[in-house]
Image: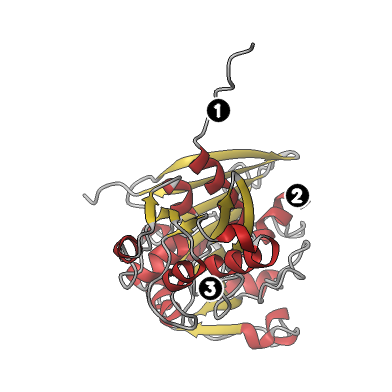
Amino acid sequence: MPPPIAYKETPDQHWMHLALDQAQLGAGLTSPNPTVGAVIVAQDKVIGRGYHHKAGEPHAEVEAIRDAQKSNPKLLRGSTIYVTLEPCCTSGRTPPCTEAIKTAGIKRVVFGAYDPNPKHHEQSRDIFLLAGIEVTAGVLEAECRAIIRPFTKWITTGIPYVIAKAGQSLDGRITRPAGESQWITNDAARAHGRRLRMRVDAILVGAETIRKDNPQLTLRDGSSGSGKMQPWRVVLTRSGDLPPHSHIFTDSFKDRTVIMRGKDLPEVLADLGKGGVLSVLIEGGGIILGQAFRERLVDEVYWYIAPRLCGGGRPSLAGSALPQSIRLDDVTVRPMGDNVMMHGFPIWPEEP
């Protein structure tokens, strides 16, 4: 008889991976709530699945309970629920999930990350234990925390999570010589960069980007039918001199355009955070990107590099020099045709 198969993960990790798959279905759609997924397991099989679709609608736990009640009601009582985030215990737009779990007769709760919201943080364990429900916390915690990075930053600081994106030449330029096409990167790289808009609540650019490129800053490449609301299009300008015929002022999403005049980037981000914006994608230009890095405002980076030398034009990080170099952590490098995408998270050096 062959020896038993040695699995690389525990049963709890296996089921939590399925809950993470559920959570990804709601990525970019739940603001100002976190992205959460859940599965309910009984007799070594999934009897219910759910994820949080959007703010104001049932949370992942309730969706999974309802799914189990439809398909396997007899197995629900005594089952185990796997949730990527600690279940909430207060009433907001929806009732507390702790009560829904207790009412459903679930006997074990396994969650990945503790809720960073101070109203909920480490509150559910005592509630469940008093009800005779077993609790296991911290399963695939790193993965579960990763999917709520924007929510974590916003709920703890009031400032949106910032993703910086740029497409540049080998010599670090984001514009080509006069008379040439505006595009530096290839179609695949540009399409990948546009899909980042699905993840965020707002897209931020400088006035020069509007004047020179007249971008649309809309959801495209298969994203428009996802249920995702068009992100706010935020333009930073000193003069207020912007072409009135620009796409952002004339298309069907013109009401999703916001002009921030005479404000510095930190002030703009603070204002957006107060308005419930959890995440921002900075798409340019070089002056805004340079300021974002100089002031340590960037949380995540997507950089697209093309095999082209421009010899001039605007650098990807314009303005005064960075005080120190910035290294990226947890780096992913991905070829996109003859272009390369580099993704990572800044490690800020200690202040001198």
- Quick one: which residue is furthest to the front in this view? 74
Looking at marks 2 and 3 on the same chain, the residue that comes earlier in the sequence is marked by: 3
Q: Residue at x 38, y 70 (%)?
A: 155
Position of 342 compared to 151: left or right? right
In the image, what residue type sits under mark 1?
Tyr
The reply to whether residue 226 is in sight is yes
| Residue 78 drawn at (x, y percent) | 50, 56
Q: What residue is shown with label 1?
A: 7
Cα–Cα span, label 2 and label 3: 28 Å
Q: Amino acid at mark 3?
A: Ser
Is 248 displayed left or right of 62 in the figure?
A: right
Q: Residues within 10 Å of mark 3 (few under 14, many from 20)?
A: many
What residue would you read off at disc 2? 188
Q: Earlier in the sequence, mark 1 or mark 3?
A: 1
Quarter of the image for residue 75 reads bottom right
Name the residue: 35% across, 69% down: 117
Q: Nearer the viewer, mark 2 or mark 3?
A: 3
Q: Which mark is residue 346?
A: none
Q: What is the C-alpha distance between the residues marked 1 and 2?
A: 37 Å
Q: Nearer the viewer, residue 247 or 170?
A: 247
Circle 3 residue: 31
- At horizontal 58% and vertical 66% (from top left) the residue drawn is 65
Observer able to see residue 204? no
Reply above or below: 203 against 143.
below
Which of 239/219 is in front?
219
